[in-house]
Image: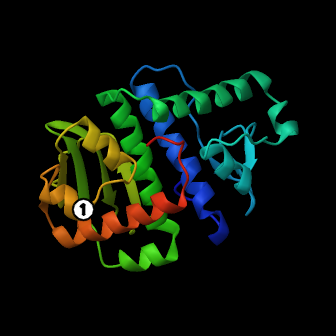
Amino acid sequence: MKNDHPAKEQISAWAIACSLSAASKEMIEQNIWVQCLQPKLQGPSWISLTKENNLIFSNVNLVCVAGGTFAIPKIACLLKKPIKSLGALLTLIMIRRVYLKKKHTMEQVRILMLAGLETAVCYLNFHSYSKSIMADESGKIDFYLKEEFLGSVSCSTNNFWQTSNRNTQEKPSIVVTFKDLNTAYRGALGKIDPLVDAAEKNVLIRGRIPLIEKFSYISRLAMKEVPIPKTL
């Protein structure tokens, strides 16, 4: 995915594909039976969710799928490898169920946090306005639920932002700690109010504040433009 560069009108759909991939990988880490989604661009109007190109959606249809509306992928590609295609479709259903789960758990929040961070990172890397905001920024942002590590976002030497579910030894520029499961769940969906939640001590932020202010702004921007299953 690192070498893929979506067209301007494709960024929201590409962010959806990347977030689905992040969710599937974390579910596999948690020993949940799903297929690992590995999205690939298929020109400016189509995106494959698998490396075998057997589940391909148009940009518009992928946005519909993310929002919970029924949409049909390319039938010819679907039939090339029907068993793998069915596995990928079932994975989409499983991810949707994670979003809709009413009783929040640590496992759910980790999946949604990594998916949400991947959405934001896609905007950091490919959305021109977001890139201009972060042009002079670098570093690493760690996210925690109390003492439990949830995920991180970091900038590599070539100014490419990436997510990780591994707690590395690299010193973070920012540490964001959520007070409880409900707050972390809202954070994963981009529904944290920086002023209110900080004032109510739902979120503790330590480190380089200008960096997290910019990241939070871009994250909220991405979450407004990228649909997710109806949750709240």
The amino acid beneath tag 1 is: Pro
Q: Nearer the viewer, residue 1 or 199?
A: 199
x, y percentage for residue 222? Answer: 47, 62
- Left or right of 195? Residue 187 is right
Kindly tell me whether residue 99 is visible in this rendering.
yes
Where is 189 relative to 214, above or below?
above
The image quadrant of residue 211 is bottom left
- Left or right of 197? Residue 58 is right
The residue located at (53%, 47%) in the rendering is 228
Where is 229 relative to 1, above or below?
above
The image quadrant of residue 3 is bottom right
SS for callout 1: helix
Q: Residues within 10 Å of mark 1 (few under 14, many from 20)?
A: some
Q: From the image, which quarter does the C terminus lie in?
A: top left
Kindly tell me whether residue 5 is visible in this rendering.
no
x, y percentage for residue 120? Answer: 43, 58
x, y percentage for residue 104? Answer: 33, 30
The residue located at (43%, 59%) in the rendering is 121
Q: Which residue is mark 1?
A: 194
